[in-house]
Amino acid sequence: MSFVRRTGRVATVGAAVGAMVLLAACGGGGNSGGNTTGGGQQQAGPNWNEKGPIQFVSGKDTSNAVPQIIDKWNAQHPDQKVTFIELSDSADEQRNAMIQNYQTKGADKTIYDMDVVWTAEFAANQYVVALPDGKFDTSKMLKPAVDGATYFNKLYAVPVTSDGGLLFYRKDWMDAAGITAAPKTLDEVKTACKQMKEKVAEAKNADCYAGQFQKYEGLTVNVSEAINSAGGNIVKDGKVSVNSPEAQKGLQWIADGFKDGTIPQGAITWKEEESRQAFQDGKLMFLRNWPYVYSKFSAADGSSKVNGKFGVAALPGVGGPGVSSLGGHSYAVAQHAKNKGTALDFIAFAAAEEQQKQRTITSSLAPTLESLYSDQELVAKYPYLTPLKQSIAGAQPRPKVVKYGDASKAIQDASYGVLQGQKDAKSATAELQTKLEGLVK
Ligand code: GLC
């Protein structure tokens, strides 16, 4: 895949002072001593004093939130400008690009916007470096997000956005059909769809439910959620436990959904963005997606057909409330990058409260600072913050393994055939159990 370069524009408005506050104030940086990796071996420490221009590498910025923050930084730091390298919207392609940059010893790509699930893999393989002790205060951040950025008790990245799955629904159609509460179970989702189709003319041609079912990381997320939401687990307490009736039930729910038309056939090719578009175009009654879609759905410029017409609730489960898979992104420093000193300062700046708040307003991504979930301005504008905080608090992490790429692929391989009706859930989970046991050690 290719990198797309977006150079930050110079901010014209006066950049607020004191933005670096908080985190930057918590440590002096400049720790260039030895660094112990997860594997325990000693290596020459990174040079945390080197400053100069850097590149920030991240997945597709659907809401244009990144340039705002970069512009503000660049206006204050003309000698340490940050350039935005924007990758695709696919988590897998982002991961490949970052690994490839390590393999080619890339010195220009400085900060990775790293998915929470890659921490173990990126840390153990030294694609990224451990951050200097004491530089970042993560005590006011959501604990699951901080745990996700930590490997062998070392912080490898600073959590900047978290993520939790949510159920988006057509509130206008639910109201018109006389349904007063969002469905809590997947069976209730089906019943609600039936009622909407019967009673609401506009809903007749809409599909019932979708998530992300293309064969990529998003499928791992949706399958994990279905399994957890049916009372099963893929890996629990370090042990592979996917070969269970509960896990089969979860997987079967998605397969049945495809079979009986609850989920449209086309969704087998959807990632976050395709499914977001379908809901936004008024083609779906329910959608499982991440909070970033909230701002897209609420657009008042004519791009959204659901502005003011949708609601947000916790994920439904099999026989009871659902469980989200923990998502999110943290900023890490690439192993071979130059100007690591500037990288630390930019990370502190981007993770500070002022920037987190701005990012939440622009993009509706989940902040990692706990205080922002009770910030009056944010809660008034984004009522979904309350179910979101609960979603993240109850979320299950995906397997934290060094061979994460292989483990995720194994989950996708096992489940994709079931979803397409080519394999049964029982043999798929048995196969997956064996494969994962070889990877999760
Ligand atoms: C979101 C989540 C991330 C997840 C990805 C899957 O970006 O934050 O954790 O892996 O979606 O597509």
Image: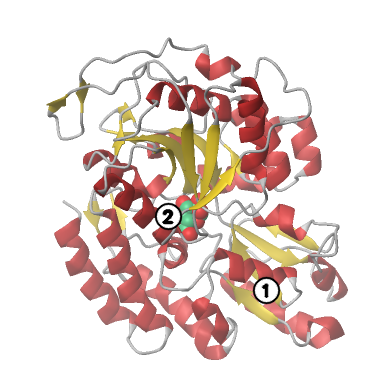
Whether residue 247 appears in this view of the structure is yes
Q: Which mark is residue 94?
A: 2
Task: Name the residue rendered at 38%, 19% in the picture.
Answer: 50
- Estimate how packed mark 1 is, as few (under 14), some (14 to 19) or many (20 or more) residues with alpha carbons within 10 Å: some
- Against 170, is 240 above or below? above
Quarter of the image containing the N terminus?
bottom left
**Which residue is under mark 1?**
278
Q: Position of residue 175 (x, y in %)?
A: 85, 69
Residue 373 seen from this side: no
Position of residue 312 in the picture relative to residue 316 (left or right): right
Label 2, secondary structure: give it: helix
Of 230 and 315, nearer the camera is 315
Q: Residue at x 24, y 14 (%)?
A: 33
Q: Residue at x 31, y 52 (%)?
A: 100
Q: Position of 190 compared to 400: left or right?
A: right
Given the current orientation, which residue lies at the most extreme front position?
79
Q: Quadrant of residue 170?
A: bottom right
- Alpha carbon separation for disc pair 2 and 1: 23 Å
Looking at the image, residue 425 lies above or below residue 5: below
Q: Amino acid at mark 1?
A: Ala
Amino acid residing under circle 2: Gln
Locate residue 167: give its quadrant. bottom right
